[in-house]
Amino acid sequence: MPYEPPTHTVERSLRAKTGARIVAGIDEVGRGAWAGPVSVCAAVTGLRRPPDGLTDSKLLTLKRRTELSEVLADWVTSYALGHSSPEEIDALGMTAALRLAAVRALEALPVRPDAIILDGKHDYLGAPWRVRTVIKGDQSCIAVAAASVIAKVRRDAMMAELGLEYADFGFAANAGYPSPTHRTALEEYGPTPHHRLSWSYMDALPRWRHLKKVRITPEAAALEAGGQLGFDF
């Protein structure tokens, strides 16, 4: 299916309106997986012409995505990845875990960005970062598309490595997302140390439901401690 190649339009707009010199594109992968980390890539590309065929990683074949990832590693000005573990996802919830992974990626860049293009409509980063959210930014913005490809390939490689130890779960093929192989292994063997134990799929595993974790929100913790929510006298 033909698609419009990504551009520097949003980046140029940010530079013009805010005076930003260094703009990073951010994308995540692993948000909907049952196992493995949620991973975020921050990529700085400048305003150079991108490699041919660059777009959202989900629109690329495995072969093309892998090839592009190798090219991008040398083409981008800089990039870094950040991860939040299944334990952190269980403890913090996905939004906070995403922010943690994104901050780790941004802080690992050699130079702090002046502004950020974030894929999607929800700003899960917030202050002090200067953020522009762009729906389908991984298709329309060059820096975000680059981050998308790098994040996908690197996380897939991490999950394939985990799959060597947990061969029955098919992590090399499903990257921790739901699949028939993954579901069958969960029913038979229960969750691995790399599974997100607070997720609702655990309710469908009668033999292993006792392992489910319940995340205690700050509001629930306040109630449990005898605090009164919503009032500050």
Image (cartoon, rainbow, N blue to C red):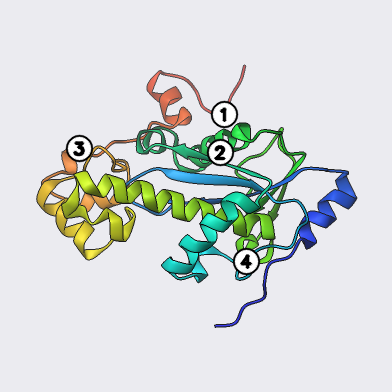
The tag earlier along the polypeptide, 4 or 2, is: 2
Is the residue 233 above or below the residue 208 in the image? above
Say which of 49 and 30 sits in front.
Answer: 49
**Does 179 sit above or below residue 155?**
below
Q: Secondary structure at mark 1?
A: loop
Give the amino acid at mark 4.
Gln
For the residues carrying marks 4 and 3, which lies nearer the camera in this image? 4
Mark 1: few, some, or many residues within 10 Å (few <14, many ≥20)?
Answer: few
| Element assignment for label 4 | helix
Q: Which residue is mark 3?
A: 211
The residue tagged 2 is 99
The single residue placed furthest to the bottom in the displayed view is 1
**Few, some or many residues within 10 Å of mark 2 (<14, 14–19, 20+):** some
Q: What x and y, as percent, mark residue 122?
A: 62, 51
Query: Which residue position is annotated with label 4?
Result: 139
Secondary structure of the residue carrying numbered label 2: helix
- On screen, residue 25 versus residue 172, left or right, reads right
Q: Which residue is mark 1?
A: 230
Name the quadrant containing residue 198.
Answer: top left
Q: Amino acid at mark 3?
A: Leu
| Residue occupying image coordinates x 77% and y 43% | 22
| Whether label 4 touches label 1, CB < 8 Å | no
Image depth: mark 1 or mark 3 in front: 3
